[in-house]
């Protein structure tokens, strides 16, 4: 059995990646979502172990120092990291794993695991992003401006990603993600073992 795919997805906040990934996970049986650790406070409705593992900064530093994080980064004053264990285990079992992480973490993973597949989800325009942030109604004016500035910086990193998905219509974006996943899984290097097995079997029955 070949090792599962490692999919890295980044997007500016309010870029809609959460909704896209939720929809993708609903239909892709072999896809698992990594649950990150963070030092930020849970938002209303968030549960430990579900959206994140909410841990102290001290605990985060200990885990990072012990090599328990596949990657980690600081983002607007909080630490975020991917626990290595579940990712390795799922991939060994042949399951695909998606990491929903910001751009610094994305760059670390690409360096560490060059065979990963990276996708940058972008809003169709900054105006749409601004509108989505305002519609969400969770941030004040200063925070909105701050997020828009951050989004521009993040867009500058889009060039480091393998694929760009524009989040205009949700169904189209999800379909693009599915297409990327399917094509990547059909690449020769991910199927070399299978081809070898077919050849070996053919030789044994000749
Ligand atoms: P939020 O606090 O809004 O949930 O997430 C803030 C940012 O941190 C988002 O861009 C999200 O993708 C990113 N993030 C979440 N988990 C991780 C992680 O494990 N590693 C890194 N590098 N970024 C993460």
Image (spheres, rainbow, N blue to C red):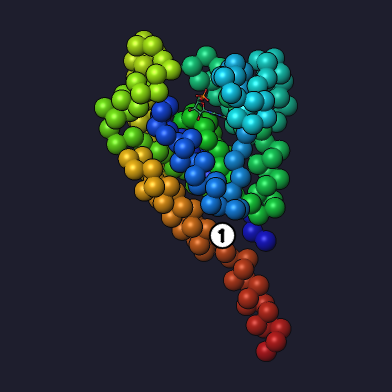
Q: Is residue 196 left or right of residue 10?
A: right
The quadrant of the image that shows the C terminus is bottom right
**Element type at mark 1:** helix
In the foreground, 161 or 151: 151
Where 171 falls versus 69 (above or below)? below
Residue at figure coordinates x 68%, y 79% from the top left: 201
- Residue 33 visible in this rendered orientation of the protein: yes
Residue 24 drawn above or below residue 35 = below
Res 39 → quadrant = top right
| Residue 97 screen position, x and y as percent | 59, 45
Image quadrant in which you'd find residue 33: top right
Which image quarter holds the N terminus? bottom right
**Would you say 183 lies left or right of 90 here?**
left
Residue 123, horizontal then vertical, whole percent = 34, 34
* Residue 100, position as x, y percentages in the image: 52, 35
Q: Which residue is mark 1?
A: 190
């Amino acid at each position: 059995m070949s090792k599962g795919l490692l999919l890295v997805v980044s997007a500016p906040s309010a870029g809609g990646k959460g909704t896209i990934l939720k929809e993708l996970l609903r239909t892709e049986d072999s896809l698992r979502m990594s649950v990150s650790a963070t030092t930020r406070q849970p938002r209303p409705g968030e549960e430990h172990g579900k959206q994140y593992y909410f841990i102290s900064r001290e605990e985060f530093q200990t885990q990072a120092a012990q090599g328990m994080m596949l990657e980690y980064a600081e983002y607007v004053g909080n630490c975020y990291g991917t626990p290595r264990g579940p990712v390795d285990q799922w991939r060994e079992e042949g399951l695909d794993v998606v990491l929903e992480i910001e751009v610094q973490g994305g760059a670390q993973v690409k360096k560490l695991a060059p065979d990963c597949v990276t996708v940058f989800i972008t809003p169709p325009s900054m105006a749409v992003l601004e509108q989505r942030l305002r519609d969400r109604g969770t941030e004040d004016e200063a925070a909105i401006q701050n997020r828009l500035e951050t989004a521009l910086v993040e867009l500058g990193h889009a060039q480091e990603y393998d694929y760009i998905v524009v989040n205009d219509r949700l169904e189209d974006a999800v379909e693009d993600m599915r297409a990327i996943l399917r094509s990547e899984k059909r690449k020769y290097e991910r199927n070399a073992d299978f081809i070898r097995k077919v050849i070996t079997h053919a030789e044994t029955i000749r």
